[in-house]
């Protein structure tokens, strides 16, 4: 839709500079609203950000973030701010067993959903019985809708569909549970079905995997430039303490630790726990208690990452899935981010759903990671570890247990001229950057519908291809 430019644009305060807040702010600014993006930190990105780690004097991401071809709203946001060319794309997933044997999952020329079958059949990581079990489960998940089996845990569903122990451990627990960042008995079946269909069945394009080739905070600097170029602004180091609604002027007064801010509309693009802390300082209205109860039902799941710098290259892979050990994912940051000119090797190891790992002391966690890495990559046995960092993102994601949809609120908040955004609101997606981008675009679109004129910024999902065009679910 062509952006409009009224002489006196309506003002919007977007509170929270994560992916949800940035996507909402940029969509509205692009459509003629005057936006103030308010962030309590000194940088944008929220949980998807980077910083200079003082212990190793290196710029690192707080955790490796990944997107997929099916993430249409996140990709749309990246295109809007001009950073889509900074995403490194790949279609293959290399699974490595202790000892080094590799299996590569990825698409072929066959039509969806058969495009992944040839590589799955060749995969050494699974026995023939495992492959039959996986095929049976994939077929069953094609028929699961968003409300089907919503009260059943994924683990119970897998046992009911006779999944083999190896299929559960090497695929469902490692690939799917780590993608959803929760234990199998704490995942609602429809979310697992969505991941299966989007990443493995709908099309090869939908399952392609993207990673930023620059630090995440550098990626989002373009969002600030985008806003400023359109007459909007970013307010850093600004902590919102309370909000006050003025009925006479139909506007909000946002009180911060510095100067107050006035706006016609507000988008609360906050994680659920941050919004919960703000609620007592919002005007009392009908529905606020319901929102508070919804927030109280959510829980966090941590993600841990171990960053290792070796004096030499230890693998030629960009990334890999590590089987049968505590480590889950390997990212070769020197290859993914070519601007890093080091002759050595910078490896990031990610452990999802890592409540147990998060309880380890720093040196214990690093030693475990280094020792396990040697089982997969012989070159690491001779390499010298030059420095290391352990990052514990204790609030990395929200959980998606059975029944959680009842407690994911809509984009419309209980207060007038106020909207919600964030990956945890009801987007039909699990805790991902795509869910955050959908929420941000939905908030912007809903706000504009009330304020006028209407805008269309929510990107449609990728259409299934091949035989998946005829599947129902």
Image (cartoon, helix red, strand yellow):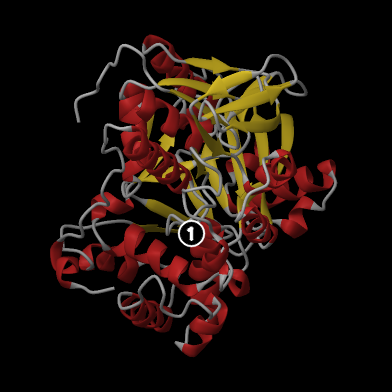
Is residue 317 something that shows in the picture? no
The x, y position of residue 248, in whole percent, is 54, 28
Q: Secondary structure at mark 1?
A: loop
Please tell me whether residue 134 is drawn above or below residue 198 in the rendered image. Answer: below
Q: Closest to the observer: 13 or 19?
A: 13
Crowd class of label 1 (few under 14; some 14 to 19; many from 20; radius 10 Å): few
Please tell me whether residue 87 is drawn above or below residue 363 in the rendered image. Answer: above
Q: Quadrant of the C terminus?
A: bottom left
The x, y position of residue 345, in whole percent, is 57, 30
Q: Is residue 149 left or right of residue 184?
A: left
At x 26% / y 36%, what residue is drawn? 454
Is residue 252 something that shows in the picture? yes
The residue under label 1 is 101
Q: Closest to the observer: 100 or 73?
A: 73
Residue 347 is drawn in which quadrant? top right
At x 32% / y 23%, what residue is drawn? 30
Please tell me whether residue 464 is drawn above or below residue 241 in the rendered image. Answer: below
The x, y position of residue 349, in whole percent, is 61, 44
At x 63% / y 49%, what residue is drawn? 285
Please tell me whether residue 266 is drawn above or below residue 471 in the rendered image. Answer: above
Q: Is residue 330 left or right of residue 81?
A: right
């Amino acid at each position: 839709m062509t952006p409009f430019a009224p002489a006196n644009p309506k003002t919007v305060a977007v509170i929270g500079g994560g992916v949800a807040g940035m996507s909402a702010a940029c969509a509205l600014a692009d459509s003629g609203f005057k936006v103030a993006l308010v962030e309590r930190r000194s940088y944008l990105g929220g949980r998807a950000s980077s910083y200079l780690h003082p212990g190793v004097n290196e710029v690192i991401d707080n955790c490796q973030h990944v997107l997929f071809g099916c993430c249409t709203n996140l990709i749309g946001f990246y295109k809007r701010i001009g950073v889509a060319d900074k995403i490194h794309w790949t279609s293959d997933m290399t699974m490595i067993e202790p000892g080094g044997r590799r299996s590569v999952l990825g698409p072929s020329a066959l039509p969806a959903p058969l495009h992944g079958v040839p590589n799955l059949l060749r995969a050494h990581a699974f026995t023939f019985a495992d492959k039959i079990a996986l095929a049976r489960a994939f077929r069953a998940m094609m028929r699961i809708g968003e409300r089907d089996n919503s009260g059943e845990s994924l683990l119970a569903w897998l046992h009911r569909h006779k999944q083999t122990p190896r299929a559960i451990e090497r695929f469902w627990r490692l690939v799917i549970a780590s993608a959803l960042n929760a234990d199998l008995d704490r995942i609602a079946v429809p979310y697992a079905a969505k991941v299966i269909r989007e990443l493995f069945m709908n099309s090869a394009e939908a399952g392609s995997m993207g990673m930023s080739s620059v630090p995440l905070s550098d990626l989002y600097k373009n969002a600030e430039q985008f806003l400023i170029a359109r007459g909007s602004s970013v307010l850093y180091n600004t902590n919102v303490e309370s909000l006050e609604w003025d009925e006479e002027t139909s506007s909000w007064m946002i009180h911060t630790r510095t100067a107050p801010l006035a706006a016609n509309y507000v988008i609360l693009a906050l994680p659920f726990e941050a919004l919960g802390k703000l609620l007592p300082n919002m005007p009392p209205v009908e529905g606020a208690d319901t929102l508070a109860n919804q927030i109280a039902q959510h829980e966090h799941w941590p993600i841990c990452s171990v960053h290792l710098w070796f004096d030499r290259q230890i693998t030629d892979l960009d990334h890999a899935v590590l089987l049968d050990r505590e480590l889950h994912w390997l990212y070769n940051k020197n290859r993914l981010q070519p601007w890093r000119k080091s002759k050595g090797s910078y490896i990031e190891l990610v452990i999802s759903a890592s409540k147990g790992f998060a309880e380890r002391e720093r040196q214990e966690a690093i030693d475990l990671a280094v020792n396990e890495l040697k089982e997969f990559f012989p070159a690491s046995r001779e390499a010298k570890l030059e420095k290391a960092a352990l990052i514990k993102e204790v609030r990395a994601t929200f959980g998606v247990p059975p029944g959680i949809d009842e407690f994911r609120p809509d984009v419309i908040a209980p207060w007038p001229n106020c909207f919600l955004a964030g990956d945890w609101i009801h987007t039909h997606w699990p805790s991902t950057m795509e869910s955050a981008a959908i929420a941000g675009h939905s908030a912007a679109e809903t706000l504009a519908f009330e304020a006028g004129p209407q805008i269309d910024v929510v990107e449609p999902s990728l259409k299934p291809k091949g035989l998946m065009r005829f599947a129902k679910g």
